[in-house]
Every structure is written in structure tokens, then in C-alpha cells.
Amino acid sequence: MNQMIEQEPQRQRYFMEQMKALVAERSREKGRPLTCMINTFGCQMNARDSEKLLGILETIGFVEADSEEADFVLYNTCTVRDNANQKVYGRLGYLQTLKKKNPDMLIALCGCMMQEPSVIEKIKKSYSHVDIIFGTHNIFKLAELIYNRMMGDRMVIDIWDAAKEIVEDLPVERKFPFKSGVNIMFGCNNFCSYCIVPYVRGRERSRKPEDILAEIRRLVADGVVEVMLLGQNVNSYGTNVETPITFAELLRQVNEIEGLERIRFMTSHPKDLSEDLIEAMRDCKKVCNHLHLPLQSGSSRILGLMNRRYTKESYLELVDKIRAAVPDIALTTDIIVGFPGETEADFQETMDVVRRVRYDSAFTFIYSKRTGTPAAAMENQVPEDVVKVRFDELLQEVQKISGEVCGRDINTTQKVLVECLDDHKEGYVTGRLTNNTVVHFPGDASLIGRIVDVYLEEAKGFYYMGRCDR
Ligand code: SAH
Ligand code: SF4
Ligand code: F3S
């Protein structure tokens, strides 16, 4: 075995070649192709990572299966809230029964949960049927890790504390032919006091603008019309590259790419959202009419404890500025209920912001204690029953408002990017407006990936029914 190639991605290309031969041999023995399945938990970063992982698996000869009864099953995990972890442990029991039926099956775990030492200990102790464990910093090594597992007879564990380099130019298998996530940065430096992401994803690292632009040009040449620029805080993009560049400038450059139709991005931290970015959003025609602006709490006191570095007032001012520059923009948000020390008065401040901003939609979360974060050590955790009451009150308000504002484009003709066949109604397709609202209208598979004019006939709260206006 050639262990001498140190440089990436050449080293991985070598292991992919080795694996290709191995997979082909096993598949000959079995008289059928080897199958693989990736189950992805968590956010868009994980979804994008899974596309890279699938790219490697398909390159080495695995065929994607649609169930976990496969020869290689990989869970790409999330640990942002405890319920995500519990789901993984629950599923691992089920995988064990599958492995009894197919003893050659390989089970692998990766993603954010694996960056926590306590998780690794638990898996080693209680889930010895797992074959491979790796983390968030070395997903590009998948071929090498499978190779090592197949050549040996023990669990392979490879977790890095920090990223060593950004490895470019490995295969990717996109879920959608017409749209794609594009990482512009990795990691997070913000250390919001409740959040585990900076610990499991490491420090902030931006990709070079030329690599990002080249990737998007390649995607467009391959049929992509919409990109989602991904980072935990895209507004601080570009501070740690050789020639510093702002996110606003990157947006302007992406906007110039011919053939690209829509640009989205996720996530924007309110503390770093500059005037310059607001102008870029206003000027760039391809930037979608939607901004996800996580609030977390409407109480300035709680925001301070959360280490968010903005106040209720500065958040509301920011919303006004954005709406002045981009009228009709759809705003969405994330809110946490039950942060330690949250009083009824604090909670009502959150309700007040929700009523003033009138979000198109809001993801609401019950605070989940994450070991190792500053908030986990705070004493006055809010009792579960109190949190539950507040959560229900918030959810009801959020849904009521969203039902009222989402229909604002009724009786107009809008551009819709068709994403798939409607899974509820035969003869219909489903797509999205630039502001991200879903539209169903009569059509067939030939429309998928195309942007068409649709007349919005009926507002149904969170979505429209329309008809193609051609
Ligand atoms: N980088 C993004 C958020 C990534 S995590 C940002 O700053 O907006 C996605 C969402 O999960 C967060 O916005 C927050 O609302 C929620 N979240 C994070 N940690 C949490 C915790 N410990 N308990 C409950 N919700 C949490
Ligand atoms: Fe977590 Fe805050 Fe970073 Fe978002 S910005 S990932 S909430 S620490
Ligand atoms: Fe979860 Fe990791 Fe994303 S913890 S939310 S998958 S960055």
C-alpha cells in the first residue's frame, strides 16, 4: 500500500482507486452491486457534506439505495439539540438488527456529534457494531477510512480536533440537478453561550473567493440555476483569507456569473449585517427576496447572556433598514424559548418582536442544555412546564402571523423555480418563489429545474395554489 502520498487531494484519489477495485471485487463475489445509504441530520452544512460523502461513495462504486438495508450505511449526525442525538442512538439499535441479516454490512458515523468525546466513549462501549467513526474536519478522507476498515478487523476511529486544511476538488453528488449549496466558510467564532457548533465545527475558515466562484461556474455549466451560499455566519466571510474581502463583495461577484439565476445565503448574524450588504442585496438582481435573520430572543438582557452582541432595539432598527432598502423582503428567523434565567417579562419581549417584525416563518426551539457550553453551567434553568407553555404561545403567534403575511402576493404573476412533482396531488408540481414561499400548480416533470411564470390564485397560509401563466 502506498502510504507515501501525503498531499491532498492526491492521497484520496489514490485511496479511491484502491477502493474502486475492492468494491468491484466484492460486487463480483455477491453477483450484485454494493449499495450505500446516507442518513443526514441537522443543517444545510451537513446536507452539503453528505453530497460530498455520496460523491466519494459513488466514485468508488457504491450504488445509492433508498433504505438502510444497504451494504454501507452512514449517519451524518447533528448535536445542536439533544433530541438530534437521541434519534441517532435510537436508530443504531435498528441498524444492529440489519447487520445480523447482512454481516458484511458496514456502519459508519460522522458529523457534529462525533466531535464530542463523551459520544465516542458511549459508542465504543454500547454500540460495538459500528465500523467507522469520523468527525467534521476529515470527511474528505472517507475512501481511506473505508479502506482501512476493510483491510483490518476493528472499529476505525479518526476524529480531528481542528481542521488542518480545506481540501478542494473532490467528487460531489448533488441531490438536486438544478440547485446546490456552496460552502463559503466553515466553523464559527461567535460562541453564543448556548451553542455547541463552535466546539464541534472549529474556528471560522473562509474559502478563497476564486475557489467559490470557480465552483459556482462549474455548477452552472452543469445545470444549476440556484445556489445557497453556506456558512454559520456568512456576514463575517472573508476576514481570514489572504486578500480580505467582504461578503457583500462576494455577493456582487457571484451575481455577475452568467447563467446563474438565483442566489440565497444562510446564515446571517444580525451583529455583522453591514450597510454594504444591505446595498448589495438591493442591487444584485439574482439575490433572492428573502433573509433569514435569527433573533434567538427579543429580550436585550437575555441576548446579553446569550452573547449575541445586539439588542432588541438594534435588531428592530436593522429590520427597518432592510425593509427600507428591499421592500417586500420575506424575513424568517430562529427563536429559542427557555434560555436559563428567562422570565415571563423576557419572554414577552420576544413576543413583542415577533408581533412587530411579522416574520414569514420562524423556527422555534426549546432551549437544550449542551454540555461544555457556558449556558449549561448557568444556575437558573427554566422549569420544563413553564417552557412548554411559553413555547406553545409563541408557536401559535408565529403561525397566525405567518398565515397572514405569506399570502401577500396573491393574484399576481411570479417567477417560480420548479423543484419536484407535487407529492400530494397528481398532475401538479411544486416550486418556490424568490421569497422562498412554496407554490403548487398544474404541470409535469419536464418543468423541474425551470423558472416559470405562475399566477398565484389561492393563498393557503404557508403556500399558494397557482396556474402556469405562459
Ligand atoms: N449559525 C446560525 C445557527 C446555527 S444553529 C446562527 O447563528 O443563526 C441553528 C439554530 O439552532 C440556532 O439559530 C438556534 O436558534 C438553535 N439552537 C442552537 N443551539 C441551541 C440550543 N442549545 N438549544 C436550542 N436551540 C438551539
Ligand atoms: Fe452557534 Fe452562534 Fe455560531 Fe450560530 S453564530 S453557530 S448560534 S455560536
Ligand atoms: Fe447540527 Fe452541526 Fe449543523 S450541530 S445544526 S449539523 S453544524
Image: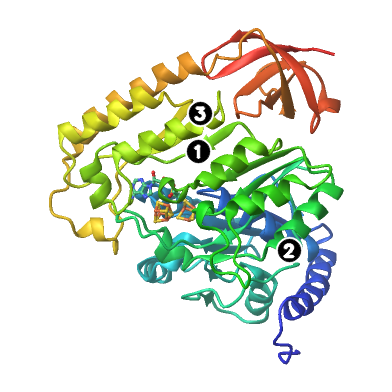
State which tag comes first along the sequence, 1 or 2: 2
Which quadrant does the C terminus fall into? top right
- In the rendered image, the vertical position of residue 402 relative to residue 334, given as above or below: above
At label 3, counting other C-alpha atoms closer than 10 Å, the crowd grade (few under 14, some 14-19, many 20 or more) is few
Q: Is residue 392 visible?
A: no
* Mark 2, secondary structure of its residue: helix
Residue at image x 70%, y 71%?
143
Q: Measuring 38% from the left and 46% from the top, which residue is drawn there?
A: 83
Q: Is ligand 1 within 8 Å of the beta carbon of the residue shown at mark 1? A: yes
Sequence order check: which comes first, mark 3 or mark 2?
Answer: 2
Q: Which of marks 3 and 1 is nearer the N terminus?
A: 1
Q: Is mark 3 on a helix, strand or loop?
A: helix
Residue 310, given in percent of the width and then of the height, sits at 33, 47
Indicate whether 363 appears above or below 133: above
Secondary structure at numbered mark 1: strand
Name the disc covering residue 71, or none: none
Label 3 or label 2, whichever lies nearer to me, is 3
Q: Which amino acid does label 3 sit on?
A: Ala
Is the residue indicated by label 3 positioned so its CB lies within 8 Å of ligand 1? Answer: no
| Nearer mark to the viewer, of 1 and 2 | 2
Q: What residue type is labelled 2?
A: Glu
Can you tell which mark lies on residue 292? 1
Residue 4 percent coordinates (x, y):
73, 92
Disc 3 marks which residue?
324
State left or right for residue 300 relative to residue 266: left
* The residue positioned farthest toward the left in the image shown: 380
Residue type of the residue flagged with mark 1 = His
Q: Nearer the viewer, residue 145 or 311?
A: 311
Residue positioned 28% across, 51% down in the render: 306
User: Which residue position is annotated with label 2?
Assistant: 210
